[in-house]
Amino acid sequence: MLEDLKKISEDFVKYYSNYKKISYEISSFERIFGGASRETYKVELSSKSTKEKLIYRRTQQSSLIETEQITEYLAFKAFEDSIVPVPRIHLIEEDEGVLGAPFIILEQLDGEAASPFQEKIYSPNEKALGMQFWTFLGEITKFDIKSSNLNQLIKHSKDPYWKQELDKWVKVIREDSIGVEPILEVGIRDLYRTPPNNNQEACLVHGDYRNGNFLFKGDTITGILDWEMAHIGDPLEDLSWALSPIWCWKEQSRPGYLIDRAQALEIWKKTSGLEIDPNSLSWWELFSCIKGLAIWISAGNEFITQKNNDPINLFSAWIPGDIHLEIILEKIEKRWKLL
């Protein structure tokens, strides 16, 4: 692993020096663990006249979530000068022959990312961070997808967005499961049987908007990260994912361990300009559980088959998977009472 890191760092600094026409030396080059779709490195370079702090993201040969890096690039570019804080992209390279894998280089923002499972990590700034978190999600929801290259993400399908997404994640479950999980199957049948209202205009969906996927410094969110699952879809998809109890398991009334649910929903509605149909939100919240389990099942498959033996895949298939099964039971019970 150390030899791999040494070669990756040497190849990178040589490439970037040639690209910038500046002779750089490596001040630091370290792997950021935790992501499951890109290898991510935190890089600091120096020359006689300048210093640069960069993030280097390489597409993995085998990853938990198969995504195209152009999606992430388009999302970052779309929000580059918006109220939603994102790092600036320096360049994208799709040719794996250049550095052994397709990659993106972007600026390194100040701040830190936290595990979504640490309930006290944002203290004492939960309120300030929470208001920003839900405001930014509202801004993403109302972003004009026709005013940028995001229209490249539109899939020309006759199926409504809910079915496109449900079909996609059920396919992952069918391909990667090593057994049958009855609770999961009940949830899937319930979603197909009682679809949500389909009267909202399409918007950009971040795809993994939650605590843990933003940088913060004190009481300020400095960057919204991990856009590789972005797509065009229903506004309630991101909302339900961010609300999921798995991101606030020990205090479920406070999504993301930030602010309480009712306040979060009011901020989102005010910013996005949208109303929330309770039945549709209930559907999307159950969908989030199915999507989550699909991801954890895929993680387990990656680890068991040794396609990717990163320990995060073992953890994901174990603890979050069990938690999501509990949430599915709870959501189904509430939905049946609601319906």
Image (cartoon, rainbow, N blue to C red):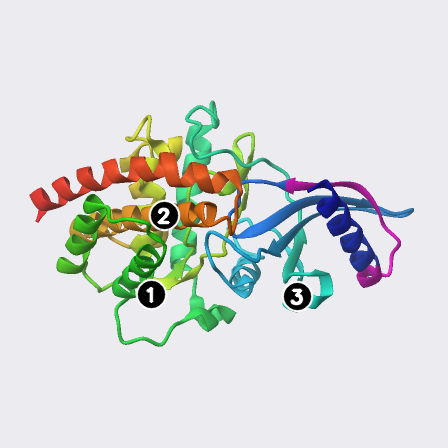
Residue 202: mark: 1
Query: What secondary structure is found at the residue carrying circle 3?
Result: helix
Q: Give, as a three-letter code, the residue at label 3.
A: Glu
Q: Residues in magenta?
A: 18-31
Residue 282 versus residue 147: which sits nearer the camera? Answer: 282
**Label 3 CA crowd tier, 10 Å (few <14, some 14–19, many 20+):** few
The three-letter amino acid code for the residue at tag 2 is Ile
Residue type at mark 1?
Answer: Ala
Marks 2/3: CA–CA distance: 28 Å
User: Residue beneath label 3, please?
Assistant: 96
- Image x and y of residue 209, in percent: 42, 47
Alpha carbon of mark 3 to alpha carbon of mark 1: how far? Answer: 33 Å
Q: Earlier in the sequence, mark 2 or mark 3?
A: 3
Residue at image point 52% right, 48% down: 308
Do the CB atoms of the residues marked 2 and 1 lie less than 8 Å apart?
A: no
Report, in whole angstroms, how far the alpha carbon at label 2 lies from the one at label 1: 29 Å
Q: Nearer the viewer, mark 2 or mark 3?
A: 2
Nearest to viewer (mark 2 / mark 1):
2
Disc number placed over residue 297 in the picture, else none: 2
**Secondary structure under badge 2?**
helix
Residue in the image at 48% along x and 68% along y: 150
